[in-house]
Structure formats: C-alpha cells, structure tokens
Image: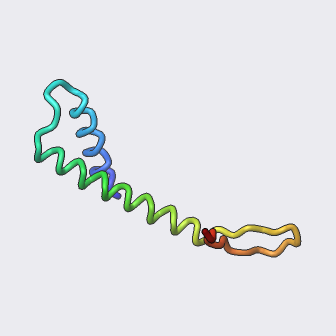
C-alpha cells in the first residue's frame, strides 16, 4: 500500500476525533481505505507464512502446514 494512502487514513482518523467529525463522503473514503489496508496486510502475512519453514528436531526443514479444525 502506498504511503500516501496510509497518511490519508491517519489524517481521516485524526479528523474523526475532532468535534467537527467526518462528512459522509469522508466516512465512505475511510472505510474503503481501511479495507484496502487490511487486505494488503493479510496478503503480505500470507505470503510471509507461505515461505516460512520449521526446522524439526531431526534437522529437516518443513513448510508450515495449515491447521486442521
């Protein structure tokens, strides 16, 4: 995610805590930017976990496996 979008999220968050608050258009923009940020974070975390390996006691490297419910 671009730094400009993160800065805009922070700007809207600060404005929402002021007495004037956010307009409806700004609330919609804030929700969309937050969703985009969360999706980018999840994607990054999944990619990192997909490339993580665990070294067992026998010294063998194994990729992480999905936990079965």
> Whole-percent x and y of residue 53?
69, 70
- Report the residue at 18% width, 45% height from top: 27
Which residue lies at the image location 68% right of the left edge and 74% below the top edge?
Answer: 63
Number of marks present in the image shown? 0
Q: Height in image: 6 above or below 55?
A: above
Q: As drawn, is 28 to the left or to the right of 69?
A: left
Which quadrant of the structure image shows residue 54? bottom right
Q: Position of residue 55 (x, y in %)?
A: 78, 68
The residue that appears at 82% across and 69% down in the rendered structure is: 56
Q: Quadrant of the N terminus?
A: bottom left
**Relative to 50, 40 lies left or right:** left
Q: Quadrant of the C terminus?
A: bottom right
The one of 39 and 7 positioned closer to us in this rendering: 39
Whether residue 10 is situated above or below residue 5 in the rendered picture: above
Say which residue appears at 58% left-offset and 71% top-offset: 50
Check the image and report above or below for 13 versus 6: above
Q: Is residue 67 left or right of residue 54?
A: left
């Amino acid at each position: 995610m671009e730094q400009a979008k993160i800065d805009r999220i922070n700007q809207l968050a600060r404005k929402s805590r002021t007495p004037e608050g956010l307009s409806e258009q700004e609330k919609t923009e804030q929700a969309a930017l937050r969703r985009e940020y969360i999706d980018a974070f999840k994607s990054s975390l999944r990619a990192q976990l997909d490339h993580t390996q665990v070294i067992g006691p026998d010294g063998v490297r194994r990729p992480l496996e999905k936990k079965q419910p």
